[in-house]
Amino acid sequence: MPEVQYVVLLPFFTPPSFPSRRTMKKLEKSTLKENQTLQISGSKSISNRLLILESLFNNIKIGNVSTSQDTQLLKRALSENTETVDIHHAGTAMRFLTSYYAIQEGKMTVLTGSERMKERPIGKLVTALQQLGVEIQYLENEGFPPLKITGRKITESKVDVPAHISSQFITSLLLIAGKLEKGLEINLVGKITSRSYIEMTLDILTKAGIHNSFEGNTIIVEPFTGHPSSVIRYEVESDWSSASYFYSFAALGRQTLHLKSFYRASTQGDSAIAKMYEEFFGIKTVFTEEEHKITLLPAEGFRMPEKIVLDMNNCPDIAQTLCVTAAALKIPFEISGLGTLRVKETDRLLALYNELKKLGTETKITDSTIQSVSFGEPQENISIKTYQDHRMAMSFAPFCLMKELNIEDEKVVEKSYPVFWEDLEKILAPLQD
């Protein structure tokens, strides 16, 4: 029997069905129950990286895979042998599969997605792959999906990539690097964006037996020389991005919450939420190592800051949550490092600008920043538009502790957290008149 290496042990989840129609979620004004415990699904970021490696190297077994729609779409794409692959709204899948199909020798693949996906730029990744000798064509608009990818053997081993681009572009290259004959050297030109996500990828490669280094702006990944009979089993840590919404609930509701399964030494960039919410909102994170549990503990008598000033370049995906928390508590904020939010599921900075108004918060935005301008009273009959963005739905949900509101297109949460609304029912109690 092959030797099996166990990394972390967590429970498994059954994937949900995909959404079929849009509905409105009404959230009554509520209170937060005391001492509730939730089990959060595995990290989408880690799961998607591991799925690509599992398909490439065949010696990786994954437990606690994310139940998110994005991950299920990626799994389906990797399991199907079709010429056209439609990944709908799954941006991570689009980026990771672009490189994955590029090295499938002799296979032609058309990689496409939703109308919004066709508006999300992928040119920098395509250019990097073309530098390596890959044949990729744009089928509609230059720089955007859909793509026609003709897989071939890559013999080039060095590529220059703009450092400010999405870390997912860089990760896409890193995931295939160990499969290349000469490995890969990536020179990142300029200031690096979301460095923590790149480091997460390199940590996963290391655990998979793929040697690498990251010094200055140069990443080197060596060809994989491990023995395929040595099976490595990964149990995915729960998702810190999903945990962020409950930090917001704890900050607004001032009650203790418990979340499983999380680790002090997490490689997820969004674990920065713990430090931020302790500093700015008085929510201390207590780790219980043997249970792989964190407790969100509101500090008694905590004095809120006069202003929040943050560079969230390394963790932009939790910016929406933090902005809503600050708006609900009327704490002035100035957040920078958010350039990548313009090209997510929606233009998240513009979406925040529009929807925070409904909470009584006026802001001003630039290409990479958002700053509060004034605080007033929230609107009556609040209805939050989600713009087909899962994080808009979940980041605004904690405001129900302040005032009832509606979340449009409630099924959008299935992209990353399919049981979000069910979990809210476990921790909320309607406010009694």
Image: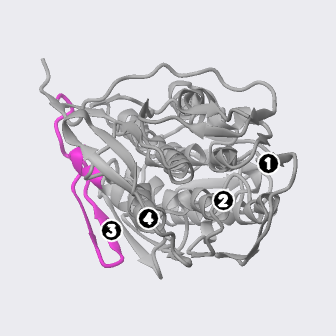
Seen in the picture, residue 124 relative to 412 is either above or below; the reply is below
Mark with earlier residue (4, 3)? 3
Three-letter code, disc 2: Ala
Q: Is label 2 or label 3 in front?
A: 2
Q: Which residues, given as a range, are shown in magenta?
A: 203-229
Marks 4 and 3 sit apart, C-alpha to C-alpha, by 43 Å
Q: Which residue is mark 1?
A: 384
Q: Nearer the viewer, mark 3 or mark 1?
A: 1
Provide the residue designation for mark 3.
219
| In this picture, residue 131 sits left or right of residue 286 | right
Residue at left offset 55%, top offset 57% = 317
Tell me, what colour scheme is on the image?
Answer: one colour
Q: Nearer the viewer, residue 127 or 45?
A: 45
Give the labeled residue for mark 4: 302
Q: Amino acid at mark 1?
A: Ile
| Residue at image location 56% in from the left, 24% down from the top | 80
Q: Are marks 1 and 2 in contact (CB under 8 Å)?
A: no
118 up-or-down from 303: above or below: above
**Percent from the top left, x then y, of residue 199?**
34, 61
Front position among marks 4 and 3: 4
Q: Which residue is mark 2?
A: 328
